[in-house]
Image: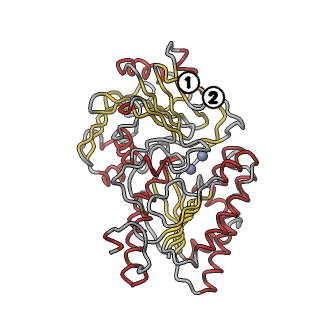
Amino acid sequence: MIVFLLADGMRLDLLRELMAGGRLPNLEALVREGSLCTATSTFPTTTGPAHLPFITGRFAGECEIPGIRWVDKSRGWFSRTYVSLLANGKMDRDLRGDVETVFQHAPSACIFSHITRGARLKVPPFGHFFSHALNTWLEFDSLGMRLTKRCCTKGYALVFTLLSGIDEFSHRYGCRSKQAFAAYQLVDRWVGRLRRYLGALGVEHEIIIASDHGMSDTGVHIDLVGKVRRMGYTTGSYPLSLRKGEVFVAESGNSMAHLYFRDESRAPEVAERLCRLRGVDLVLVRTGGEVEVRRGSESAHITSEGERCRYEATEGDPLGVGEYEGRWMDRDEWHAATLSTEYPDSVVQIAQVFGSRRCGDVVVTARCGYDLRTLEVPEHKASHGSLRREHMLVPVLSTSPLRVRRTTDLYWYMVERLRAWHQQGRGSSCTSSPRESCG
Ligand SMILES: [Zn+2]
Ligand SMILES: [Zn+2]
């Protein structure tokens, strides 16, 4: 069986630092016996959308969930937020109908996951809302791990658990706060306990621990909604101003936002002004069948044909692509070409998010140290959502010698393992919806 622990917001550099300091002995032992590798996430690097690659093998835009808030202009400006007490089950419904999940390949248990399509056991994350109010994230993660341990002996081939403490405490107290570190240590203690428990029972298992995105500390809130309003436009936004306005601003992870225009001809002018704002990093604009990439005074265009993309610089080189500029390349080639830049996998990630009909006319990201929101209560001290490497690169730990490049690769790896599980004759009790792999 596979136990997949999604340690939301776990940072690669802090994980390494805490392991080197002897503060995560169980994870350190797991890595020594198994593996630790770095993978790229999906854009936007936001809780929810960035969980999709693990579960579906696809990027957020390909699943038609291009943010934690979005608007579907083709459905009469239908707007959605997943940041709500009533959001449970909505991601499963919004997920593109033909997208398979890893949970449909074998009997699976989902603990606190927002996406559960095809799982046999679904434990909804209602406790998130109480934890927001009562700040009981350690207790909530402990509950998640107790349920995980219990599910390991109930015949599931996959137990998928979301642990939110690191992300939530990093937002509330900062990425290097003692509270955030306590959440890393809680994961460590529970991994140790779980391995000892499964070892004593003789249960054949693999534990994978991965993060959906990195995080960076935030000191300045740009207030993108206020900035657009001061440009002379009426605005709509969550949570308070649902009136759609001329421009609807939908933030994700606080460092990324979609902007939807009633009059799309105004988008280039607003994009031009956004480029000049302090703290704004990338401004991406849909222009016909292309995406214009702007960063300060630099600009380029991304064109896609199927899974091949081309990046053509107009002024400077905003994504730092260098010698690969002007070439048509496939997804793997672009991944290799951009991995060491400030924006890993940028070309493919921009193309995929603009491939969604729910993507904004303009997408904005913040520089590190800034975010796009107004002041929130409690104030956010850390953010994610952007294409920068601080947000895009995530750790993947496993009890097996595992090497993946993108978080989508983990889906295919798990599907292969679950198929093997079936072929070994242990899938006879599969009751999920009929699929080839269950046949
Ligand atoms: Zn997250
Ligand atoms: Zn977060």
Q: Which mark is residue 225?
A: 1
Does 285 sit left or right of 148 as displayed?
left
Residue ID at (56%, 60%): 6
The image position of residue 279, as x and y in percent, is: 56, 29
Q: Which mark is residue 363?
A: none
Disc 1 packing (10 Å; few <14; some 14–19; many ≥20) = many
The way the protein has been coloured in the rendering is secondary structure
Would residue 128 be found to the left or right of residue 1 on screen? right
**Above or below: residue 293 compared with residue 340:** above
Label 2 Cα neighbours within 10 Å, binned few <14 / some 14-19 / many ≥20: some
Image quadrant in which the C terminus is located: bottom left
Q: Which element is circle 1 on?
A: helix
Classify mark 1 as within 8 Å of ligand 2 or not, answering yes or no.
Answer: no
Residue 251 versus residue 424: which sits nearer the camera? 424
Nearer to us in this view, 176 or 202? 202
Q: Quadrant of residue 310?
A: top left
Q: Residue at x 40, y 39 (%)?
A: 320
Q: Are marks 2 and 1 in contact (CB under 8 Å)?
A: yes
Q: Looking at the rendering, which quadrant does residue 154 occupy?
A: bottom right
Q: CA distance from mark 2 to mark 1?
A: 8 Å
Q: Amino acid at mark 2?
A: Thr
- Going from the N terminus, do you reach mark 2 or mark 1 first? 1
Q: Nearer the viewer, residue 332 or 229?
A: 229
Q: Element at badge 2?
A: loop
Q: Is mark 2 within 8 Å of ligand 2?
A: no
The amino acid sitting under disc 1 is Val
What numbered label is drawn on residue 374?
2
Residue name at image x 25 percent, y 47 percent = 308
Image coords of residue 326 (percent x, y):
25, 39
- What is the x, y in percent for residue 164? 63, 54
The answer to whether 146 appears left or right of 244 in the picture is: right
Return the x and y of residue 99 as percentages of the image width and height.
36, 55
